[in-house]
Image (cartoon, helix red, strand yellow):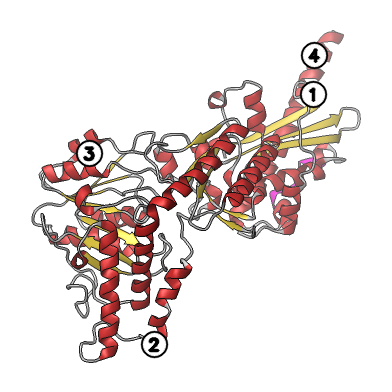
Amino acid sequence: MKLPIYMDNHATTPTDPRVFDAMKPYFTDVFGNAASRNHSFGWEAEEAVEKARKQIADLIGATPKEIVFTSGATESNNLALKGIAEMYAERGNHIITQVIEHKAVLDTCKRLEKNGVRITYLPVRQDGLIDLDQLRAAITDKTILISIMYANNEIGVVQPVKDIAKIAKERGVLFHTDAVQAVGKIPVNVIADGIDVLSLSGHKLYGPKGVGALYVRRRNPRVQITAQMDGGGHERGMRSGTLNVPGIVGLGAACEIARREMAEETKRLSFLRDKLQDKLTQELDEVYINGSLEHRLPNNLNISFAYVEGESLLMGINDIAVSSGSACTSATLEPSYVLKALGAGDDLAHSSIRFGIGRFNTEEEVDYVADKVIDVVRKLRELSPLYEMAKEGVDLSKVVWAAH
Amino acid sequence: MAYSDKVLDHYNRPRNVGSLDKNSHDVGTGMVGAPECGDVMKLQVKVNPETGIIEDAKFKTFGCGSAIASSSLATEWLKGKTVDQALEIKNTDIVNELSLPPVKIHCSVLAEDAIKAAIGDYKKKQQVTAKAETVAVQ
């Protein structure tokens, strides 16, 4: 076993060596511009791009013409929200999203608000799922779009996408989903799920960074999007810019591998995740799992170790790469807004760790991680005045703290 | 974020972890911070009432590595000082000793506050004791 161990696969994944092999020729040998129509260099590049387009479409049940290549999911989300708000401005100016979206959606919405679009940010329940009745009630005759993520990047909860799509369709509203964490991990099918627009990213499914795609439905209904980048009119006018051929080839290869291996991989990952979860919850008292256990990605575990601060825990497990919702580990010095939205209290957000198990993690690594975390949590609780008070029977919620 | 060697040393081998009897009249206890802010420090001093010298100091901290190191360092510095000398410890001394980056300065402030709170608690107890003795003499 090699240290350090990478177990932060919601942040990014390593490029699968098979993906990298597929990409290699497209840097040097097959370097053509896919938009060059009058020589073989261009034709070969275009052929590779079209193959990748089909591989991506096949993974999500789309047709190749519905795939628009982008630089990643942040761009896809920007393009979807801004492009739809602009295209459908005459029909309405209201978009519904939720508070635990990724910043690429939330900050895009903030920008749209400045431009006069009205945004509703739905709260989530304690299990991290949205309330469908609240969604129904939020729709008005001005609503043009519902944007709800497929699976959350911090707590891994999977939203009731089919139900959301059904509600959207009934009311004639478009449905976009940021499916970055879901595509390639759990079955996603734009037809069966009823998705109109979907964002995905290469580097979250063992493809390269710097490439992503936006699925834009072409039938029932035909979705139109105003381009947000002006130029050569690539990608059916929706996204100008010379195509990133090696990246696109890599994204295609990653999608094909995911499609073939997803069933097996899901079994293996959920076994490892459950093992990690069981060890931590059996060996330690007062640990809390954040978000629904039932509606969850197979590789996610987000867990709070009460009375232990997240950054100090990360310091103790410095040969393991994971993330914390603690304010000390974020640039903003605020604890995770996702965990706060669950209403669990800031103290549990400060105490949270996100484990993202991936394709290349082994059972041996999971055992090592579990043992090490247990060891460090015990050590830090010996150091924790809060743990001592809790053991003495003090109700910490009733203490008047000298906050500074 | 990279931690200084001194922060790592205090984190890995925290000095004077533990608790003193908070009901004892020669022990002062300071508890500062709040769980929802991500740091709580408990710092205690045991003072010789005859000499005014801090004979023992203990801490427990919920917080990041820099908060743990700041309070651990504070207990080291407190031992052997008089209560008045203890009040002269400034957060900037802790920042310099541990090479804390700007985002971690609040940890040193918290440690200074904890020292002041512990000494304040001790002094309050002494006044109460003194008053009680005066009453007893009368």
Q: Which residues are magenta?
A: B85-92
> Label 1's element?
helix
Q: Residue furthest bottom?
A: A39
Q: Determine the chain carrying the residue at label 4.
A: B
Same chain shared by disc 1 and disc 3: no
The answer to which of marks 3 and 2 sits earlier in the sequence is 2
Same chain shared by disc 3 and disc 2: yes
Q: Determine the chain carrying the residue at label 2.
A: A
Q: Which mark is residue B132?
A: 4
Could you say where residue A273 lies in the image, as x and y percent from the top left? Answer: 50, 44
Could you say where residue A192 lies in the image, as x and y percent from the top left? Answer: 21, 48
- The residue positioned 41% from the left and 86% from the top of the image is A28
Q: Which residue is mark 2?
A: A29
Q: How dense is the environment of label 3, judged by Cα within 10 Å: few (below 14), some, or many (20 and up)?
A: many
Q: Determine the chain carrying the residue at label 1.
A: B
Instruction: Report, in whole angstroms, how far the alpha carbon at label 3 lies from the one at label 2.
Output: 51 Å
Q: How dense is the environment of label 2, judged by Cα within 10 Å: few (below 14), some, or many (20 and up)?
A: few
Instruction: Report, in whole angstroms, how far the alpha carbon at label 2 lies from the one at label 4.
Output: 92 Å
Q: Which residue is mark 1?
A: B126
Query: In the rendered structure, are the residues bearing label 3 and label 2 in contact, judged by CB atoms less than 8 Å apart?
Result: no
Quarter of the image where the N terminus of chain A is located: bottom right
Instruction: Report, in whole angstroms, how far the alpha carbon at label 4 lies from the one at label 1.
Output: 10 Å
Relative to B37, residue A255 above or below = below
- Label 2 or label 1, whichever lies nearer to me, is 2
Residue A359 visible in the shown view: yes
Could you say where residue B78 lies in the image, as x and y percent from the top left? Answer: 81, 41
- Position of residue A250 in the picture relative to residue B70 (left or right): left
- The residue positioned 85% from the left and 41% from the top of the image is B81
Query: In terms of depth relative to the viewer, which is nearer, A328 or B114?
Result: A328
Instruction: Report, in whole angstroms, how far the alpha carbon at label 1 lies from the one at label 3.
Output: 62 Å
Q: Which residue is mark 3?
A: A135
